[in-house]
Image (spheres, rainbow, N blue to C red):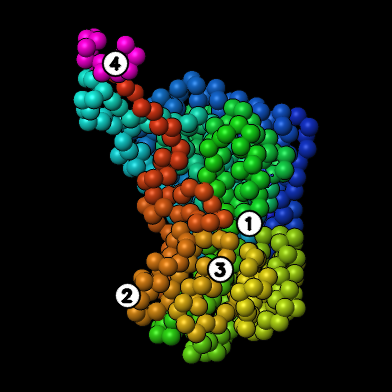
Amino acid sequence: MSTETMVQQFPLFINGKWTPVSSGETFDVINPATGEVVAKVAKASEKEVDEAVQNARRTFESGVWSQKTPAERAQVLVKFSNKIIEHSKELIYLEAISSGGTLRKLGGADIRQLVLSLQQTADYAVDYKYVETLPLVNALGPSRNQIVREPMGVVAAITPWNFPLVLAMWKIAPALAMGNSIVLKPASNTPLGTLKLAEIAVEAGLPPGVFNVVTGPGSSVGEALVTHPEVDKVAFTGSTEVGKTIMQQAAGTVKKVTLELGGKAPALVLPDADLEVAIPGILLGVFFHSGQVCEASTRLIVHDSIYDEVVQKLAAMSAQIKLGNPLDPATGMGPVVSKQQMETVLSYIQSGIDEGARLVCGGKRATGPGLDAGYYIEPTIFANVTNDMKIACEEIFGPVLSVIRYSTEEEAIKIANDTIYGLSGGVWSRDVVKANQLAAKIKAGTVWINDWHMFRNDAPFGGYKQSGVGRELGISVLDEYTETKHIHTSLTTENNQRPALKLLF
Ligand code: NAD
């Protein structure tokens, strides 16, 4: 794959077609590895958001997708997954030059995840209980009672920049499986792969107008979507701060919302942890994708007896991580997504120093051949961190690890749960019985024992506390994209068999 880039133009994708914006306005997408503009993307106005939503609504009401059988929809999802494989090189390239995701991440995890989640959802869509008949209850008189599951209508999906395609697919697949139409707004740093994905879906046989993409700032385009009266549900992944705004905006029309928000995951390292396994595992847990992962293991809570050894080994091994251009297969860690994100991360690092944490390694913008023009940050480890420091409380979203000391298990759990977040957590220990006992005490939606970042499409993912509302993945995600209706049919024409009449007569 060439590392040379040319500036591509991307209009919106509405009703199965590339659709220019009437203002002609665009915004730049910048490659974080080089600082170069790689694409110009249409900036939608409220008018175009409305056009996309109205198209999605019309398509939904037409029944062209919403009335297809589950098996027909599942077939299209499988075709969609096959088309993604066909187009994988282009998708990987578009994601790499905008998000800074490495070839190893995009090829080794993201594309696989897209394909497998579509295939898994296609299976679920066929198995799902669309109609359930309830047992007879004599007290109501003879009746047939059914629970019917229906699509909701128009889903607005809003996604962040760290895993643009994967997090879009976690919404697209269940929304489509259940027969909904979608308008998706990707993050402005990383809209390219998602726009291409919408085109691929149509190529796979998805009727035009079912899956639309509008691009532009969250404050205008995002808000126009979240407040649009023809949108029935909002599926959001992003920061807790924006999630709160979205919840408030959605309240105006009482839309259903699912929110996947921030995290500040605790990882407990017990005295008996197998450090041969734990050290590389912890580093993967925190530095994968330059730490821009919501469920990253950012707070390491280490027992006093092994604290110094763990810190020293982490620092030594982190020196082996190769920083470089995401398009180079040798690269282990790429840049952070933007100049602004780099500055945010560097200011967090400064706050750690100012608050008295001990900088063990990293701490600076990474420089050197091939790095100077990009937004690279050295893998950074702080020791002697206390849980009240800013670097331990706030989500940094960069390659920064805070190592905190504990001496009793009660103290470790208290520190682990002393956070507004509850997305993920973990335990490193040879004693899996003990580790499971501690896992039960960690208030988080996912807990890994002697591992990290291990997702399954059949395991729900989401947050406790301010890390979110609802769950993605797993069969239960389909409930998040359906309305439930109870249909009661009286099976008698005899009034003396209708006990409720006695309430009045
Ligand atoms: P962000 O919250 O800044 O933006 C997310 C999306 O919301 C973008 O598309 C943005 O344009 C849009 N947006 C911004 N303001 C809006 C508004 N007022 N109304 C509607 N939409 C608006 O997040 P980000 O910086 O793109 O991504 C990083 C954040 O995402 C981190 O906090 C991270 O933890 C979180 N995240 C969570 C998960 C999860 O599954 N829980 C996964 C990945 C990322």
Depth check, mark 3 against mark 2: the one in front is 3
Q: Residues within 10 Å of mark 1 (few under 14, many from 20)?
A: many
- Mark before the other along the chain sequence, 1 or 4: 1
Residue kind at label 2, given as amino acid type: Val
The residue indicated by pointer 3 is 418
- Mark before the other along the chain sequence, 4 or 3: 3
Depth check, mark 4 against mark 2: the one in front is 4
- Mark before the other along the chain sequence, 2 or 1: 1
Residue kind at label 3, given as amino acid type: Asp
Bounds of the magenta segment: 490-505
Point 70% across, 67% down: residue = 345
How far from the left and from the top, in percent, is residue 278?
A: 45, 79
Residue kind at label 4, given as amino acid type: Lys
Q: Based on the displayed image, in which of its 4 quarters is residue 381 positioned?
A: bottom right
Quadrant (top left, top right, bottom left, bottom right) of the N terminus: bottom right
Mark pair 4, 3: CA separation = 57 Å
